[in-house]
Each structure stands twice: as structure tokens, then as C-alpha cells.
Image: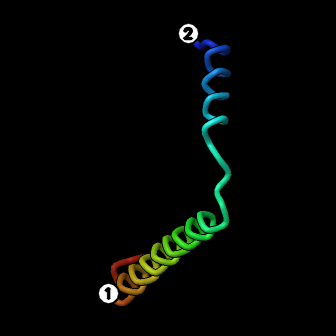
Amino acid sequence: MFDFGQFVEQSKRIFSVSKKPDWSEYKQMAKITGIGIILIAALGFVLTFVFRFLKLGL
């Protein structure tokens, strides 16, 4: 069964160990996320273009 007290203790431990990212870590995460979004969008664009060019649907 679910033990709420144990959950609270584990949560306290996680919050005591974790820290807020500094500015350089935040910028790095933002860059990586942005690059990922751009790559996925570019892949979708290329696939749509190829499917429409070959008249395969979409």
C-alpha cells in the first residue's frame, strides 16, 4: 500500500540534494531544446515535401 509518510521523507531528501540550475546550465538546456525543436520541425517539413512531391498522400 502507499505510505504517505515515506513519500514525504523521500521528497524532502530530493529537495535537499537538488539545486536550481545556474545561468550557464539554463542557457545550455535552452540551446539543446531549441536545436531539438528545429530538427524535428525540419524533419517534418522534409517528409511532407517528399510525400507531396511523390504524391504518396498527406
Residue at position x 43%, y 81% from top?
A: 48
Residue drawn at point x = 60 percent, y = 24 percent? 10
The residue labelled by disc 1 is 54
1 versus 42 height, above or below: above
- Report the side of 32 relative to 47 (left or right): right
Identify the residue shown where x is 56% and y is 65%: 29
Quadrant containing the N terminus in the rendered view: top right
Q: Which residue is mark 2?
A: 1
Q: Quadrant of the C terminus?
A: bottom left
Image x and y of residue 35, in percent: 50, 75
The location of residue 15, given as percent across then percent down, is 66, 36
**Three-letter amino acid code at disc 2?**
Met
Q: Give above or below for 38 relative to 11.
A: below
* Residue that extends furthest to the top in the rendered view of this protein: 1
* The residue positioned farthest toward the bottom in the image shown: 53
Q: Rounded to the nearest whole Å, what is the CA distance between mark 2 and mark 1?
A: 56 Å
Q: Along the polypeptide, which appears first: circle 2 or circle 1?
A: 2
Q: Nearer the viewer, residue 34 or 19?
A: 19
Q: Of the residues shown, which amino acid type is indicated by label 1?
A: Leu
Q: Is residue 35 left or right of residue 22?
A: left
Q: Which mark is residue 41?
A: none
